[in-house]
Image (cartoon, grey):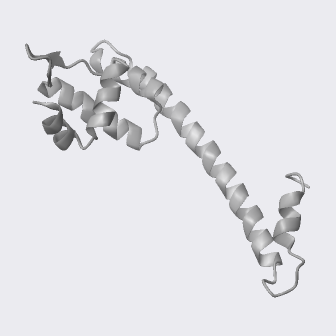
């Protein structure tokens, strides 16, 4: 397959595929003309990477997951640990977003939104967090 075909089938842009090749996540063969020739295994890896990235795994986490995927002697506990660590990161981000939502909701509700110049939102943003 050429890059256009593998991009269509994997759902990834050609630019992303070239980047993944550049950083060593995939290694397509090269024809005599220098063009990339992707195998079914390359397509499978790219699909795997696309799905992992859509779940928010970092490139390095994807590299580790891909290495474990290709290692038939892997321990599932290693895979689980990567996923658990990532889940903890997501939970932390959600907690931070919820705190932001609470603060911003309070500020918006405190603002009358009329023609007066005083604005609790601006006052709130000028104070250090947690004050």
Q: Quadrant of residue 105?
A: bottom right
91 vs 125, left or right, is left
Q: Nearer the viewer, residue 73 or 12?
A: 12
Vertical relation: 110 (above or below) 22:
below
Horizontal side of residue 130 vs 102, given as left or right: right
99 w.r.t. 113: above or below: above
* Residue 114 location (% of width, % of height): 80, 87
Q: Quadrant of the C terminus?
A: bottom right
- What residue is at 61 percent from the left and 50 percent from the top? 94
Furthest residue toward bottom: 115
Q: Quadrant of the N terminus?
A: top left
- Let me know if residue 68 appears in the view: no
Residue in front for this viewpoint, 128 or 56 = 128
Q: From the top left corner, tell me how far across and down residue 80 is, in percent.
A: 45, 28
Q: Total label count? A: 0
Residue 50 coordinates in the image, percent (x, y): 32, 38
Q: Residue at coordinates 69% horizontally, 62% vertically from top-left?
A: 101
> Is 81 located above or below residue 105 in the figure?
above
Please say whether residue 96 is visible from this viewpoint.
yes
Residue at 46% from the left image edge and 24% from the top image edge: 60
Q: Quadrant of residue 121?
A: bottom right
Point 74% across, 65% down: residue: 104
């Amino acid at each position: 397959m050429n890059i256009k075909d593998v991009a269509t089938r994997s759902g990834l842009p050609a630019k992303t595929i070239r980047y993944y090749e550049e950083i060593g996540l995939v290694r397509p063969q090269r024809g005599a003309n220098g063009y990339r020739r992707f195998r079914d295994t390359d397509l499978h890896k790219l699909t795997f990477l696309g799905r992992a990235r859509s779940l928010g795994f970092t490139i390095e986490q994807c590299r580790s997951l891909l290495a474990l995927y290709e290692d038939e002697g892997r321990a599932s506990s290693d895979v689980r640990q990567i996923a658990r660590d990532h889940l903890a990161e997501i939970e932390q981000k959600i907690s931070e977003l919820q705190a932001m939502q609470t603060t911003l909701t309070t500020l918006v509700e405190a603002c009358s939104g009329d023609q007066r110049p005083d604005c609790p939102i601006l006052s709130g943003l000028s104070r250090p967090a947690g004050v």
